[in-house]
Amino acid sequence: MYTRAEAAEMVRAYLHREYPRMDLVLLEDQAQEFEFGWVFFYNSKEYVETRDFHHALAGNAPLIVERVSGRILSTGTAEPVDAYIGAYRRTGDPHARPSSIVRITGYRAGANTVAAIQALRRHATKGLTAAKHDIERVLDGAIVEVDTGSVETAGRLVGEFDACGFNSSHERNRNAA
């Protein structure tokens, strides 16, 4: 388990290692703390000292530092940092994005299998036999993927699975097939 001070020092070392020819500084007053760790921001030393935008960095994606492992993950700049944090919280990957494919990964005690089969039939346009087979495979410990045809439908299916006691997601990690 790392402290904020240790995480900040790891980010400084990371920045020095990744950008050895640049004089970068950590913007400690802008760091954000979460249950999983911290998000750190940085910029050029010259910009921080002068506030002259000619010296500001472009593309300096905030960095996530995991509290337990100390792993450093770069976010991105195409979306607000909250989008990257949300994706990280849901999947462990700040670059994961919603997909039309739903992964059913397990179930909780008391799960309603009939409701899960019905939800699968509605949102993945599966027949009764195929839907029942997929849910039985999940009950046997398999991870099952189904294509719903759209991100919106996938989101609805994930919500219904949650309500009936099944674990699922419709986000794909950037390195997932």
Image (spheres, rainbow, N blue to C red):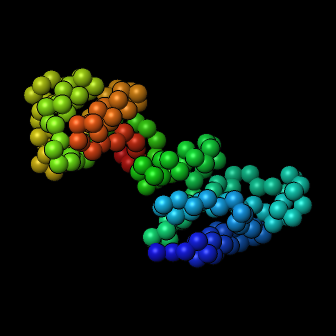
Taking 106 as reference, is 65 left or right?
A: right
Q: Residue at x 48, y 61 (%)?
A: 36
Number of numbered discs visible in the structure rendering = 0
- Find residue 72 and report its horizontal and vertical position in percent: 54, 65
Q: Residue at x 41, y 30 (%)?
A: 151
Nearer to the camera, 32 or 79: 32
- Find residue 51 and report its horizontal and vertical position in percent: 87, 57
The picture quadrant where one finds residue 138 is top left
In the image, residue 81 sits, relative to residue 35, either above or below, namely above
- Find residue 11 and report its horizontal and vertical position in percent: 62, 70
Nearer to the camera, 49 or 100: 49
Q: Residue at x 74, y 51 (%)?
A: 58
Taking 55 as reference, is 130 left or right?
A: left
Q: Residue at x 13, y 31 (%)?
A: 114
Nearer to the camera, 89 or 96: 89
In the image, residue 31 sits, relative to residue 98, either above or below, namely below
In the image, residue 91 sits, relative to residue 156, either above or below, namely below
Taking 125 as reference, is 150 left or right?
A: right
Q: Is residue 174 visible?
A: no
The picture quadrant where one finds residue 24 is bottom right
- Find residue 75 and report its horizontal and vertical position in percent: 57, 53
Q: Is residue 156 visible?
A: yes
